[in-house]
Amino acid sequence: EEGKTLEFKENTSSLEKVIKTIIAFANTSGGVILIGIKDRTKEVIGLKNIIKEEEKLANSIADSITPTLIPNLQFLSYRKKDILMITVPHSLGPYYLKSKGYKKGIYIRLGSTNRIADDLIIEDIHRMKKHTSFDELPNFDLSTQDFDFSCIEEVFKAEGKKISKNNAFSLGLFVKHNNKQYLSNAAILLFEKNRTFYFPDAILRLGRFKGNTKSQIIDHLEIAFPLYECIDKCLFFIRRHTTYSAQFGNVKRKDISEYPEIVLREAITNAIVHSDYSMSGCNIQIAIFDDRIEITNPGGLPLGLRLEVALSGVSQLRNKIIGRIFKELKIIEQWGSGFGRMIDTCISQGINPPKIEELDRHFRITLFPRKAKMKVLLEYQKDIIVYLKKHKKISAKQAQKNWKVTSRTTSSRLKKMCDLGIIISLGTSPFD
């Protein structure tokens, strides 16, 4: 299916749309465009004169996009039909359509659509070019002289660590600018007790809803404490609105939570560390339903990072300083281990694994309760899971080879596994 990194085009008759997609892919996470395939039916119709089409497209890319962008153009043959494949790498531009100008010609990819980048996205691209995150920036509304440093000292002392003001500079909590000293955005978010004065939307909203929809709310809570305190306060609210069962051993009774605490803690920590605090009007939200918990934070994946890469354990911090301090305070153990730990914990305890998804400019982790019926895998599905654990990914050709079935049966089985959420489809060519 078409998505953040894949698009089908029947031909190049709408050349500007192809160019916009190339720009959007380059500015977001890269991607692949296949020309010669109907986007609705996925029917491969091919191109009549692929050399002419390739030449026309190459000239248009050179004439229409700035700065210079050089995607890879490749000819494919599928059942005697020619397909033009455009592979666009992610690169720090920002790239834009000359005819639209800088402000209106920068496109990004959200889902399966191209959209004009707003000022926040453009600022994000420029920060990435400088290898700077939003939380590293100085906040000119609060100098170090107006801040009670003992707030930070007490937190580190509780972990058996000492911190000086010099350490605060090296950790990125304090920033020098024009011979003056300011708190970074991270320091305010993490330790300033009145942080919502500076970041009014940086609060966590929690709600317990009746049933499985948001039509009726039973209880709610807004958390505006310094970020390092928020995880435990969220867990307390969740415990209040989820159930426990008793397991009796030889000597003691053991209470079993509806949701494993290690999974909840990882999901909440992920939302706090990776939230985009530069976005206004958006909050971290935790919604508790009868059949699930949804934890949603503003900001999709950082530019250049794809979901399949993140799920493989690659970490790209949106907020470098917040992540560094969480590691110093032992809230985070190891970069990139969170998703894997959540999935492994759920599977080992017979719980459906979390659903992890990017929703335009938001990111969501959905957790399922212990009482939910675990998906029972069929033998052919188990074969693929075993292969994926070893090789991380599998092509349709390899799946067909493993199963020893027809290509049609292979496609049907893979689609069913995707629909059930057992695997994720990341096809980039008609052969996947």
Image (spheres, grey):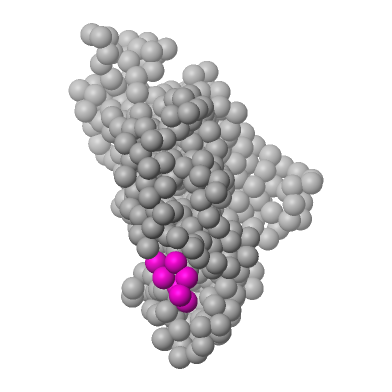
Residue 70 x %, y %: 31, 45
Residue 130: image quadrant is top left
Question: In percent of the image, x 62 and y 34: which residue is there?
Answer: 222
Residue 328 x %, y %: 29, 40
State the predominant SS element of the stretch in magenta.
strand
Question: In percent of the image, x 39 and y 29: which residue is there?
Answer: 134
Residue 3 in magenta stretch = no
Quadrant of the drawing holding the C terminus = bottom left
Residue 160: image quadrant is top left
The magenta segment is 76-82
Residue 181 x %, y %: 28, 13
Judge from the rendering whether residue 205 lies leftward or rightward of residue 401; answer left or right: right
Vertical side of 177 occupied by 45: above or below: below
376 or 228: which is nearer to us? Answer: 376
Residue 77 in magenta stretch = yes
Outermost bottom residue: 404
Vertical side of 149 occupied by 297: above or below: below
